[in-house]
Amino acid sequence: MNGMSGVNGMRGARSWLILLAACAVTFAATSIYLWHELAQARAQPPRVVNTIPPTIQVVRPPAKVSGSAGKSAAMHTAAIPAAKALDPNVEPDEYQRQQSRQLLEQLANPAEHARLLEEAKVGVRNAYPWLAERLKLSPDEYEKLVETLASSSLEARAAAAKCTVDPGCNPGEYAQANYDQRAQLVADLLGPERTKQFETYQQTMNERETVLNLRGRLPDQAWLSTEQSESLITALADESWQAQRDAVLAGQSFVGFGMNGGWIYYRDQGTTEQQMQSAEAWVNRMNARAAQILTADQQRYFTQIQQDLLANLRNQLETIEHEKQ
């Protein structure tokens, strides 16, 4: 892939990966190690990707029931098969295959599928803050959009699980087909103008997550207004795009690391120290761009978020390095 084709392809790659990001909000992340090892062995990722750690599906046991009323409830819960216990004493790749098989079994059961869909809806609402206001959606339109995105995210999880279980599967083909189908459903619901607005919103979801986290940390005297928030989101997205473009033109590839309401990117090759140096360079660019919009007090909190991300990233990379030895 030449440099310019990489630049042109980055936005498309980031778009379908947003779908998985929305799903990841719902479920607690487990070890990034599992994701990393599977990706190294199997994945054919785009030049710029968002790393989404694998998830453990939580399975709730059926409630205890008694009496005549209990018989009806018991008949209902009996349709949900008990999940097989995961064996932690296996290699990381096999453990993730266990997770994937478990998820596929749950999705094949109507009651469990319905439960997972409701959880996915919660994830979509959390992942898309201010969406109804930004697109000027009616309550009915908003709920239909949430339903569409939640269903698509669940289908994306199922596709990823199938590719984990089946070594011959191409995850990129599944993801692209899912994205194309979802895009058409959204376009039919929103119409051309609001679909374009939604696509712009999606392209800035990582930045929106960062800014939302920042607003939650700021004290009252340093409150970030809605206008400031939108300006900061736009600026960070623009700087992120420029940094990723520069990396692609230089023949490098970046991966993203997200934790606790923030995202940074770093080179996916080299030693831990080299990867950390690239992450620090990224953070410096974001801090410099944010300083053009934020006050000194606001900038202090923003910088702290970035430093926390760097510390967490170093811990994860050192863990991966240790496990390889």
Image (cartoon, grey):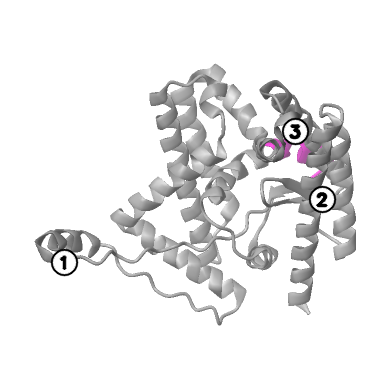
Which picture quadrant has residue 249? top right
Q: Quadrant of the C terminus?
A: bottom right
The residue lying at 86 percent from left, 32 percent from top is 296
Image coords of residue 263 (percent x, y): 72, 46
Q: Which residue is mark 1?
A: 66
Report the span colored magenta.
1-11
Q: Amino acid at mark 3?
A: Ala
Tag 1 secondary structure: loop
- Left or right: 49 in relation to 74: right
Q: Amino acid at mark 2?
A: Gln
Question: Looking at the image, is 52 positioned above or below residue 284?
Answer: below
Toward the left, the furthest residue is: 68
The residue lying at 45 percent from left, 62 percent from top is 58
Image coords of residue 67 (percent x, y): 11, 65
Would you call the spot at circle 1 few (<14 residues within 10 Å), some (14-19), or many (20 or more)? few
Tag 2 secondary structure: helix
What is the spatial separation of the Cα atoms under label 1 and label 2, in whole angstroms?
54 Å
Look at the image and tell me whether residue 313 can be seen. yes
Image coords of residue 125 (percent x, y): 50, 38
Disc number lying in front (2 or 3): 2
The residue lying at 9 percent from left, 62 percent from top is 68
Q: Amino acid at mark 1?
A: Ser
What's the mark number on residue 237? 3
- Left or right: 69 in relation to 320: left
What's the mark number on residue 307? 2
Marks 2 & 3, CB-CB < 8 Å contact: no
